[in-house]
Image (cartoon, grey):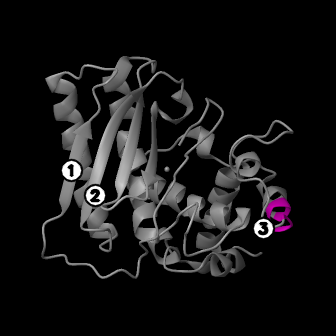
């Protein structure tokens, strides 16, 4: 999962695969990387750097989340949106077979494409690949509708990326009023606007669901002693309970 505008954060559209899926660690992964060249001419150096980071990250993530799908396609695209708040790289995962992770790199990031790749590609991959293993989908997902469900699942991916990619962005942090935000979310109907609560709220707040989800996971970790991988095996309701809700 990332951005629709500069104010929006880790956006992910994912597929229902799940941690319970059978894995085959003895089989080599089928990781395919494709570079879209419709609006950008990639240099050999850029391709080499991106391929290296993707393959290295995938190996690390698979050791942590062994139930990742065996075959994953990664599509690299260039965008001209300002997404500096998350390091110039955004991501989403689409319901293809095999699953397709789309990586968007901003060409307006300070320092250019290479600077953005170094700043945030690894973080984005850890976030999106967690979703693959978790089985979180905006549509047809195994968890059902609701902003609280979305907040927990996105929060898990944010924390997983922070803990294991070792990259943090202030834009994904939660404010001192995060507890009241969570309570607002829990009071919402199941069909509350995804866009408003996960991205841009009419009252000016941004990424309420993502940032509240981050807070929920940190609270659950602190109270239970479980790490983010252990929490990722639980249902959203169980995680909320551990967080005190």
According to the picture, the residue beneath numbered tag 1 turns out to be: 32
Residue 22 sits in quarter: bottom left
Q: Are marks 2 and 1 in contact (CB under 8 Å)?
A: yes
Q: Is residue 213 above or below residue 45?
A: below
Write the residue at 49% across / 72% down. 227
Expressed as whole percent of the image width and height from the top left, the position of residue 85 reads 56, 32
Residue 224 sits in quarter: bottom right
Q: Are marks 2 and 3 in contact (CB under 8 Å)?
A: no
**C-alpha distance separating marks 2 and 3:** 31 Å
Is residue 185 covered in magenta? yes
Question: Does the rendering let one see residue 108?
Answer: yes
How many labels sit on residues? Answer: 3
Identify the main secondary structure in magenta: helix
Q: Quadrant of the C terminus?
A: bottom right
**How crowded is the residue under tag 1: few (<14 C-alpha within 10 Å), some, or many (20+)?**
some
According to the picture, the residue beneath numbered tag 3 turns out to be: 190
Q: Is residue 144 left or right of residue 230?
A: right
Looking at the rendered structure, the secondary structure element under dot 1 is strand
Q: Which residues are magenta?
A: 183-188
Expressed as whole percent of the image width and height from the top left, the position of residue 173 reads 63, 46
Expressed as whole percent of the image width and height from the top left, the position of residue 90 reads 47, 39
According to the picture, the residue beneath numbered tag 2 turns out to be: 72
Is residue 145 covered in magenta? no
**C-alpha distance separating marks 2 and 1:** 6 Å
């Amino acid at each position: 999962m990332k951005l629709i505008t500069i104010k929006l954060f880790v956006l992910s559209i994912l597929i229902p695969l799940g941690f319970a899926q059978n894995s085959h660690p003895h089989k080599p992964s089928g990781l395919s990387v494709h570079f879209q060249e419709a609006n950008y001419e990639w240099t050999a150096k850029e391709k080499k750097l991106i391929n290296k980071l993707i393959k290295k990250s995938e190996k690390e993530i698979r050791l942590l989340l062994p139930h990742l799908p065996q075959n994953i396609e990664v599509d690299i695209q260039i965008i001209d949106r300002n997404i500096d708040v998350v390091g110039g790289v955004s991501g989403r995962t689409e319901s293809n077979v095999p699953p397709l992770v789309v990586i968007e790199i901003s060409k307006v990031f300070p320092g250019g494409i290479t600077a953005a790749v170094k700043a945030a590609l690894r973080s984005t991959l850890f976030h999106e690949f967690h979703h693959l293993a978790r089985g979180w989908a905006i549509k047809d997902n195994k968890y059902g509708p609701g902003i609280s469900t979305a907040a927990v699942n996105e929060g898990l991916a944010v924390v997983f990326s922070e803990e294991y990619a070792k990259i943090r962005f202030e834009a994904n942090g939660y404010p001192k009023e995060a507890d009241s935000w969570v309570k607002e979310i829990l009071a919402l109907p199941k069909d509350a606007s995804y866009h408003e609560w996960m991205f841009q709220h009419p009252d000016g707040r941004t990424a309420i669901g993502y940032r509240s989800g981050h807070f929920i996971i940190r609270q659950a970790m602190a109270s239970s002693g479980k790490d983010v991988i252990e929490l990722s095996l639980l249902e959203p309701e169980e995680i909320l309970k551990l967080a005190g809700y």
